[in-house]
Every structure is written in C-alpha cells, then in structure tokens.
Image (cartoon, rainbow, N blue to C red):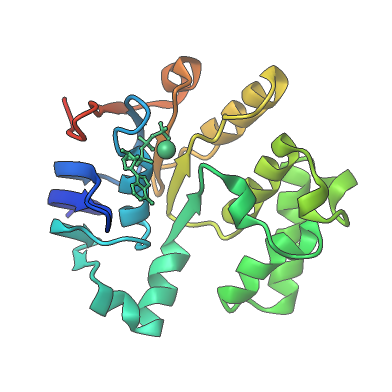
Amino acid sequence: MNTIELKNVSFNYDDGTPALEDISLSLASGRCYVIKGPNGCGKSSLFRILNGLSFPTKGEYFFKGTAVTPKFLHDKKNAAIFHSKIGFLFQDTEVMLFTGSVEDEIAFGLYQLGLSDEEVKSRTGHYISALSLEALRRRAPFSLSGGEKKRVALASILAMEPEVLIMDEPLSGLDEDGQSWITDALKSLKSPERLLLIATHNDQLVREISDQTILMDKFHHIVN
Ligand SMILES: Nc1ncnc2c1ncn2[C@@H]1O[C@H](COP(=O)(O)OP(=O)(O)OP(=O)(O)O)[C@@H](O)[C@H]1O
Ligand SMILES: [Mg+2]
C-alpha cells in the first residue's frame, strides 16, 4: 500500500473551471517527487486535495489506505491525525502566518498537535536555529520580508515533523542565496520514512532533489 493513492481524480471549481482531469497517482514513502507543469495546469489544486482542503469532483483519494472524504475529515479526531501526518507549505506563504511573533508561529502548530510545553519549547528552539531565525524570533511575521516569511512558514511545518511534506513552489520569491539555502534544507529532509512532494519551476531543484518527476500538461492531465 502506498502512502498516497489517487484513483481517476478529476476536480472542477464551483464555477465549473476544470483543474484536474482523470489523475491517477501512487506515491511511496521514502521518495521525493517533483511536479512540473505550466501555470494553471492544476498543481496547487492537486495539493489542496492531498491536504484535504478540497475534495475530488470525481474519483477517490486514499491516504495510507483510508479514503479521505468530507465525512472522514468531519470527524475531529480523524482530521487531527490526518493533519499531523501531512505538512503543507502553501504557494502563498502569506496566508499561513497569523500569530504575533516568529516563535509563536512555530509553537502554534505544535500545541495543535497536543505536545507538552517542554516539547514545544525544545522543538521551537531547534527549528529556529535550523532555519537561522534567531535574529527574527520576536518579530511579527507580517513585518518580515517575503523570503524571511517563507523560512518561518517552512520552520512551522518542519517543526511538526510530518511524514508527508507537500510544498508548493518553495523557492518562489527567494534570492539566489535563499534558493540555494532552502534547496540544501530540502535535500536534508529526504529520509526513508518521509514522502516529499514539491511543485517547482526551478530546474536546479529538480536535478538536486527529485527521485521521480511528475509532468502535468495544460489540459490538467499527468503526461508521464
Ligand atoms: N478558486 C478558484 N476558482 C476557480 N478557478 C480556480 C481557482 N483556483 C484556481 N483556479 C483555476 O484552476 C486551474 C488550475 O489552477 P492551479 O492554481 O491549480 O494551477 P497551478 O498549476 O498551481 O498554476 P501555477 O503554476 O500558476 O501555480 C486554473 O485554470 C485556475 O485558473
Ligand atoms: Mg500553483
């Protein structure tokens, strides 16, 4: 059983706009997949489905063998377990940041996981230093630069230590140093227990990190 299975998934937005057409995918733990495709092909829409933010119009999504449906996620316990296993870095990291300080931002998700104060403190400290955020720890996330926000959003997700990490354009808006820095950080996340899924237009990142590239076309299909 693969961690993520999509069976003939199609997705249309409420206004009828098609975003995914008959997508079947089988993604295994321990591998890094990169999704490439033109603007508007459906990458972010696919990620919304994988994270339970939208549901297929047609077809089915199984996470570790369980069908992810509105009914399944309506159950708070199911939703909490599901969200603790999948970390999602949005394309627009702006929408992810909402607390008063960088350290609160990282701690927030950890409290949601039900971790003890002590564990929250220790993980927050660890990921602040892992992503070089020491100088920013008391700053308000909204006041940071785009690249700094991206690092904070990434730290918040990594601190939750999810077994599946889905990242939508993790390098967009970063300068060259930032890109190479985050590329190295992402490479270090590869592990036999973890599934990485990344949408990117950055060929350097694809070369450095991808075990398998998934190609989408403008008709919202997977082509390989
Ligand atoms: N909220 C929405 N309502 C209606 N249509 C939408 C919505 N969000 C996206 N779409 C449409 O769905 C299609 C797929 O969009 P999506 O954002 O998934 O593409 P993408 O591959 O992530 O593109 P990009 O490379 O620009 O990030 C596009 O035609 C887009 O216009
Ligand atoms: Mg997108």
- Asked whether 221 or 24 is in front, the reply is 221
The quadrant of the picture occupied by the C terminus is top left
Total tally of numbered discs in the picture: 0
Q: In this view, does 66 lie above or below 210?
A: below
The residue that appears at 77% across and 52% down in the rendered structure is: 142
Q: In this view, does 112 lie above or below 154?
A: below
Q: In this view, does 100 lie to the left or right of 220?
A: right
The quadrant of the picture occupied by the N terminus is bottom left
Q: In this view, does 50 lie to the left or right of 156?
A: left
Task: Report if residue 103 is visible in the image.
Answer: yes
The residue that appears at 29% across and 33% down in the rendered structure is: 41
- Residue furthest to the front: 15
Q: Dividing the image into four quarters, tell me where ligand 1 lies.
A: top left
Can you tell which quarter of the image residue 80 is in? bottom left
Task: Report if residue 2 is visible in the image.
Answer: no
Q: Is residue 128 left or right of residue 43?
A: right
Horizontal and vertical percent position of residue 105: 71, 61
- Asked whether 65 or 23 is in front, the reply is 23
The residue that appears at 61% across and 67% down in the rendered structure is: 109
Horizontal and vertical percent position of residue 218: 24, 27
Horizontal and vertical percent position of residue 128: 76, 50
Q: Is residue 83 above or below residue 204?
A: below
The residue that appears at 82% across and 49% down in the rendered structure is: 143
Horizontal and vertical percent position of residue 189: 52, 40
